[in-house]
Image: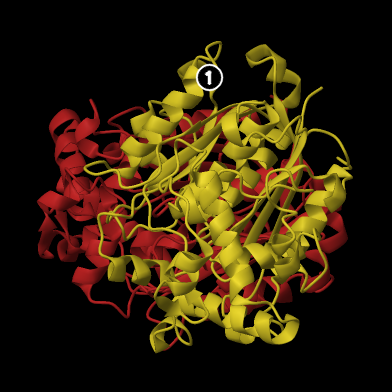
Chain colours: A yellow, B red
Amino acid sequence: MVDVSGKPLASIVSAGLSKFGKLEGKYSREIFLEATREAFAGCPSLDPRRDIKALFIGQMSESFEHQGHAGPSICDWVGLLPVPATHIEAACASSGVALRCAVVSIMSGMYDIVLVGGVEKMTHRSTSDATEYLAMASDFPLEQWNGVTFPSLFGLMATAHMDRYGTTEEQLAMVAVKNHRYGCLNPKAQLQREITMKQVLESRPVAWPLKLFDCSLISDGASCLILTNPELANRYTDSPVDIIGTGQGSGTIGLYERDDITCMESARSAARQAYGMAEKTPRDIEVAEVHDCFTIAELIAYEDLGICKPGGGGKLVEQGETQLGGSLPVNTSGGLKAKGHPVGATGTAQACEIYLQLTGQAGQRQVKDASLGLTHNIGGSGSTAAVHIYKRRE
Amino acid sequence: MVDVSGKPLASIVSAGLSKFGKLEGKYSREIFLEATREAFAGCPSLDPRRDIKALFIGQMSESFEHQGHAGPSICDWVGLLPVPATHIEAACASSGVALRCAVVSIMSGMYDIVLVGGVEKMTHRSTSDATEYLAMASDFPLEQWNGVTFPSLFGLMATAHMDRYGTTEEQLAMVAVKNHRYGCLNPKAQLQREITMKQVLESRPVAWPLKLFDCSLISDGASCLILTNPELANRYTDSPVDIIGTGQGSGTIGLYERDDITCMESARSAARQAYGMAEKTPRDIEVAEVHDCFTIAELIAYEDLGICKPGGGGKLVEQGETQLGGSLPVNTSGGLKAKGHPVGATGTAQACEIYLQLTGQAGQRQVKDASLGLTHNIGGSGSTAAVHIYKRRE
């Protein structure tokens, strides 16, 4: 392997995010177009048709729109034909993994400028359809077939975490309250309203201990980034953000196969790789977006990323360390919980938030002078994990 | 972009193919395991768990098995956790595109040894289910919704080709007869029986002018390759095959959007890239596997690859140029037509055949002294194309 320690692997020169929420009457390729328009507008010196050499697109499911072959479908609508268009599926980590593929493609020298993003259109289907399609990312014979869904899988993780570490329902609720608070500061977020501890704790159970407000949303939305070779970045922007670490890991497809369901080995492995490549430690990170598909997942993310020790997640949120003003603000975008979770779009949407933070464009939710950020994107019950580390260029 | 002209990009040190056909009672991850066992057995100096650093897997559809998240699912069964496992979907070109991603990842220096392959399990579903799931790779609003299926899309291409170039039903049938002849020489092929011109021409129409024997098969199967950095290849085998060219192109998702439906711009673009990178011309190629999902597709492939001029495909097969003993034998494996077409497995299955040919392991279907080969893998109605060029190391 080449030694890339501490060096920029690829650079973000622009980013785009559609509105997240219920986007009626639009196909996912049209929603993705909305995200690319913002990214292109933010990078006027780029001529997309001339300059962009490949597209990497994360999308989870062909089932929502009865439309597979997302690569050319989206490439066609964005006007980039005939460039290579590659569709990556890794459940809710689809665009996190697409981002890694895009970074690797830049590192290879095959392309110097690529568009990478993700999209999902979910809200036109019933909740039971959506639950079924999402469940396809878990094990068919021993999970789906027995009626296990993602709320119940994460409910099992939460129960185990509470049992082993004494994590409380209140601590879970604090994640939801925090992320809703930041959703209010993000004009693209699906839910822009604060919620109270009481509302969370009294909301109806979905899969105990997870209640309605412990769960992320069914959403439509798209996100994208324009990545360049680090040497070219200044041609397109005065404030590039370099990706300096990338990690990807895999875990068992079935939760039942694991010795320990209070952590995710895939995320630990991905984090080790990303920190190592970036030559950074958890203490260096100044802002992070983590995969809060359920409130318990955010606590586990703190632990898997080494922000606190195993079992320390509940205390960390309780002490306010992951709030704006705390030692490491997490999910300033509102997270999957309030910003929304159009599953294929989530990985690069996290990167969009870090891009805004590191370029000082995060408005009311800005982490002052943030120069180093991290994203943590999970697929399924942690069967896939992608972690990236970003640095503002000085 | 880096200049890689004429240099090896990555090297194949082993390959594996499951039996193709109706494999009852097996999940796709179990079928993939069968392919990997052959690849691992062919490379005894490799310790998969120690040496393989990533998995790239092509699979088309979550719908056949109600199982998404193919990356970790297959990584888990193959015993490679926690290495990064990336699932690529590009319809019937899924593993052709996965191969390109794998090659690019080796070029990047991110990994030095990777496993790449593809799999599909299709035969347990009804023909109408399979037709519907495959159709998801075409345009939903204007094709699928109106009942258009892949046989009808390729029927339209065939009609246009006949109208413009005078291609005949007999010439189409010759492709089927040729490929069935080679299927008989391939012990892994789904159909190992010869067919006659009369049988093809008298078989029942599916979408005129395409008849039953003009169509490829619904199949179960898996294929894989072990790829290394070219500098490491000799550590694992005395007869590596270098990949010296890779190309990928995209076309419109809808056939209705194209000015010309007698060719595929995606394939032309992919071929140009691959030839350019390899510094080779069509005349240099000694053996090729092309995407004969329907007989017309093989004729169009000859033309898009520059083996003959546009419209010359019918004559080329009629003159026997693409038979064993002809100037460029095509689809010695039996092709999708007789070997079978487990859609996600097809791209790397083509590469497996070229690997066998270039290492002199193709048995009765061996092209004598072949040292340079090509694969051409199409997704949808040519919305995706992947072309690779392979060279035996001297």
Do we see residue B321 in this rendering?
Answer: no
> Is A102 located above or below residue B368 in the figure?
above
Q: Residue at x 48, y 30 (%)?
A: A83
Count of labels in the image: 1
Which subunit holds the residue at mark 1?
Answer: A
Q: Residue at x 25, y 33 (%)?
A: B262
Label 1: how many residues lie within 10 Å, few (<14), some (14-19) or many (20+)? some
- Relative to A36, say whether A235 is above or below: above
Q: In the image, residue B224 lies at what x, y percent?
A: 60, 64
At which x and y percent is residue A300?
68, 68
Going by the numbered disc 1, the residue's amino acid type is Gly
Q: Nearer the viewer, residue A144 or B329?
A: A144
| Left or right: A275, with B350 as reference point | right
User: Mark 1 highlights which residue?
Assistant: A42
Q: Nearer the viewer, residue B139 or A62?
A: A62
Residue found 69% across the figure and 62% down from its top: A301
Element class at badge 1: loop
